[in-house]
Amino acid sequence: MPDSPQSLASSALRLAGLIAVVTGAAAGIGRACALAYASAGAKVVVSDIDRTGGEAAAGEIASAGGTARFVAADVGKSEECARLIADAASTYGRVDILHANAGIELCKSVWDTTDEDWHRVLGVNLGGAFFTAREAMRDMRSKGTKGSIILTASPHAFMTSREIAAYAASKGGQVALMRALALEGAPFGIRANAILPGAIETPMLHREAAFSPDPVEQLKRFAEAHPISRLGQPEDVAKVAVFLASDDASFVTGSCFAVDGGLMASVNSGPSISYTNG
Ligand SMILES: NC(=O)c1ccc[n+]([C@@H]2O[C@H](COP(=O)([O-])OP(=O)(O)OC[C@H]3O[C@@H](n4cnc5c(N)ncnc54)[C@H](O)[C@@H]3O)[C@@H](O)[C@H]2O)c1
């Protein structure tokens, strides 16, 4: 049934009363998502290993009139993931939204990637998503919460480039994990989805560009690789995250959402080849 004008008005704060936990929320995409969840009415647990940035993000939410607290946690450690979810549940009563966003990138060839590199990247990106999701789902199931789990994955789950093998494998694993979470969560009303951001202007992207001799030119090249011909902003991702977290997405689970300016639609990851103009 279409929304009545009254229900449209009452859904203005789409996440009113919900409790959200966002990892990697001191900067970049996670920070923008934490702010957007709070603007949509959620109480937010901002989590990160970066205390200064995390406390600043939580402070920004509070000064705008929202509710947030910072909890330091390294998602590469399962016991810290458990502590994070337990903290959110004991402070606010339960967890409705888990956004497993914390991630690290490694730009190295297969042969230069050490055992330690591999375990670190897989441990934070894939392990962190699994351990936080497992703990959140335990809380959701035990309380009958119809929760939403969102993973920030990457187009590297489906298409990749040279010198990024461990990262690509971790992101492919996240998408497979998300599908498993969706299947096991569905009988309990718990949904799981993944966002695949294109090149988004965050500290991570700037660090990646800094590998190039000309970082400014490199950022321009990243932008031009997207058919929409610009870099994404963290807020582009946050708008989709709010949708996925909300009841508007109640029939959406097990899916990937590219927020990539058309990157994955293009056969050469760049401006489309014209077959009619040579
Ligand atoms: N920026 C992009 O272009 C882009 C594209 C596709 C996917 N992503 C993914 O989006 C997510 C966020 O990326 P971003 O660009 O905002 O990165 P970022 O580096 O700008 O921010 C990541 C945040 O995660 C935190 N973090 C790192 N390791 C952590 C750990 N072990 N435990 C807890 N927090 C930790 C950092 O302190 C930082 O605050 C990542 O999963 C990344 O792989 C980013």
Image (cartoon, rainbow, N blue to C red):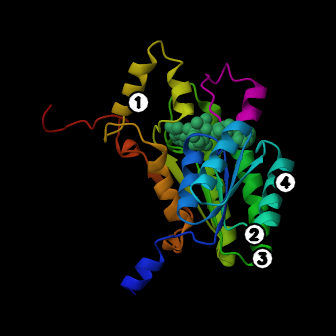
Q: On the image, which quarter does residue 181 sit in?
A: bottom right
Instruction: Using the image as rendered, state which of residue 147 and residue 275 is in the foreground.
Output: 147
At 70% from the left and 44% from the top, the residue drawn is 55
* Mark 2–mark 4 distance (CA, rounded to whole Å): 13 Å
* Mark 1–mark 3 distance (CA, rounded to whole Å): 44 Å
Q: Secondary structure at mark 4?
A: helix
**Earlier along the polypeptide chain: callout 2 or callout 4?**
4
Instruction: Locate the N terminus and report the quarter of the image it occupies.
Output: bottom left
At 25% from the left and 35% from the top, the residue drawn is 273
Q: Which residue is mark 1?
A: 222
Q: Which residue is mark 3?
A: 143
Under mark 3, the amino acid is: Lys
Instruction: Using the image as rendered, state which of residue 1 and residue 92 is in the foreground.
Output: 92
- Magenta span covers which residues? 103-121
Q: Which residue is mark 2?
A: 94
Q: Are marks 1 and 3 in contact (CB under 8 Å)?
A: no
* Mark 2–mark 3 distance (CA, rounded to whole Å): 8 Å
Q: Position of residue 244 (x, y in %)?
A: 53, 63
Q: Which residue is mark 4?
A: 83
Q: Residues within 10 Å of mark 2 (few under 14, many from 20)?
A: many
Q: What main secondary structure does the magenta stretch of the protein show?
A: loop
**Earlier along the polypeptide chain: callout 4 or callout 3?**
4
Instruction: Using the image as rendered, state which of residue 154 and residue 228 is in the foreground.
Output: 228
Instruction: Using the image as rendered, state which of residue 245 and residue 52 is in the foreground.
Output: 52
Asked if residue 134 is among those painted magenta in the image, a careful observer would answer no
